């Protein structure tokens, strides 16, 4: 099964292990420049907590920044990435004598434009959570019930989603986003997103954290940091996360 480290794939992994045994569940992770180091570390910790053995998991290095159709950062970016990644996973499963690839998509994924989901459908990937009619709230309920550590963690898409559509993607832009988000997370703004927009940067935080951005000492520190990273103005998205 495909494992991203989010609550959806974590619950799916837990359920698969409970249903058929860990010795029959092969876990595939795609690692690339699109994933922040903190997210990679978090996913590794979840696999360790679930006692997934090294023999039953495989980390596959992907290199999306050499895929021209992905780097162009069009509205189809997620489609190209998901299709390439899952094609790679399927080839690996053939070598491992596995017949089915599972993905953690859920009912809520059908409510918005998700080009990546089209790739999942085209490749015949199985989506048990979606087939069971589970939405994100229900997934969090079961994840909490089974004491999965990330049951309350906000969804976290790849770093490329922070870059304006049509702006070519490169490693420098992605690492800047990661550095800026790490700065905010270290100051207790979990689930934040940092979106560069030319000379400006837009910060998106949870509803309970928006007010904290107005605290004088916090505001001054944030402005100083982002200006030191080359941004002229720091803007706040009043549409909160979560």
Image (tube, grey):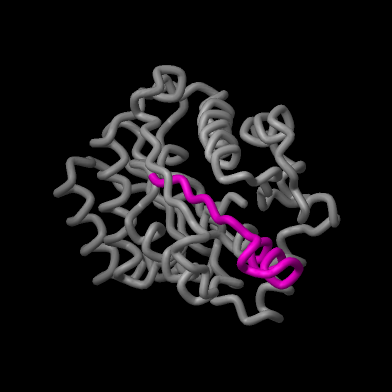
Q: For the view shown, which residue lies furthest in the left direction?
A: 228
Magenta stretch bounds? 11-31
Q: Quadrant of residue 3?
A: bottom right
From the viewer's side, name the closer residue of 170 and 129: 129
Q: Nearer the viewer, residue 48 or 204?
A: 48
Image quarter in which the C terminus is found: bottom right
Residue shown at 84%/50% (left/top)?
A: 131
Q: What x and y, as percent, mark residue 112?
A: 71, 39
Which quadrant would residue 90 be assigned to in this image? top right
Magenta stretch secondary structure, dominant:
helix
Return the x and y of residue 187 as percentages of the image width and height.
Answer: 31, 70
Q: Residue at x 50, y 21 (%)?
A: 74
Identify the residue at horizontal 60%, vertical 38% (top origin): 94
Image position of 66 (left or right of 136): left
In the image, residue 140 sits, relative to residue 155, either above or below, namely below
Question: How many numbered marks appear?
Answer: 0
Residue occupying the point 62% across, 44% down: 97
Q: Is residue 118 magenta?
A: no
Q: Is 149 situated left or right of 99 in this image?
A: left
* Residue 29 highlighted magenta (yes or no): yes
Q: Position of residue 36 (x, y in %)?
A: 35, 52
């Amino acid at each position: 099964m495909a494992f991203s480290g989010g609550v959806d794939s974590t619950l799916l992994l837990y359920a698969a292990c409970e249903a058929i045994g860990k010795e029959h569940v092969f876990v595939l992770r795609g690692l690339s420049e699109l994933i922040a180091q903190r997210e990679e570390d978090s996913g590794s910790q979840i696999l360790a907590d679930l006692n997934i053995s090294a023999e039953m998991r495989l980390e596959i290095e992907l290199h999306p920044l050499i895929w021209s159709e992905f780097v162009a950062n069009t509205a189809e970016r997620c489609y190209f990435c998901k299709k390439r990644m899952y094609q790679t996973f399927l080839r690996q499963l053939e070598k491992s004598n596995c017949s089915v690839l599972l993905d953690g998509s859920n009912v809520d994924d059908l409510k918005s434009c998700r080009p990546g989901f089209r790739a999942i459908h085209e490749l015949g990937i199985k989506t048990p959570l979606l087939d069971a009619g589970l939405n994100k709230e229900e997934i969090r309920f079961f994840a909490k019930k089974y004491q999965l550590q990330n049951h309350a963690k906000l969804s976290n898409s790849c770093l490329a989603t922070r870059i304006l559509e049509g702006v070519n993607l490169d490693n420098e832009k992605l690492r800047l986003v990661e550095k800026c988000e790490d700065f905010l997370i270290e100051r207790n703004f979990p689930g934040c997103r940092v979106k560069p927009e030319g000379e400006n940067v837009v910060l998106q935080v949870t509803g309970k954290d928006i007010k904290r951005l107005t605290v004088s000492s916090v505001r001054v520190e944030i402005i100083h940091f982002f200006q030191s990273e080359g941004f002229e103005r720091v803007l706040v998205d009043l549409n909160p996360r979560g």
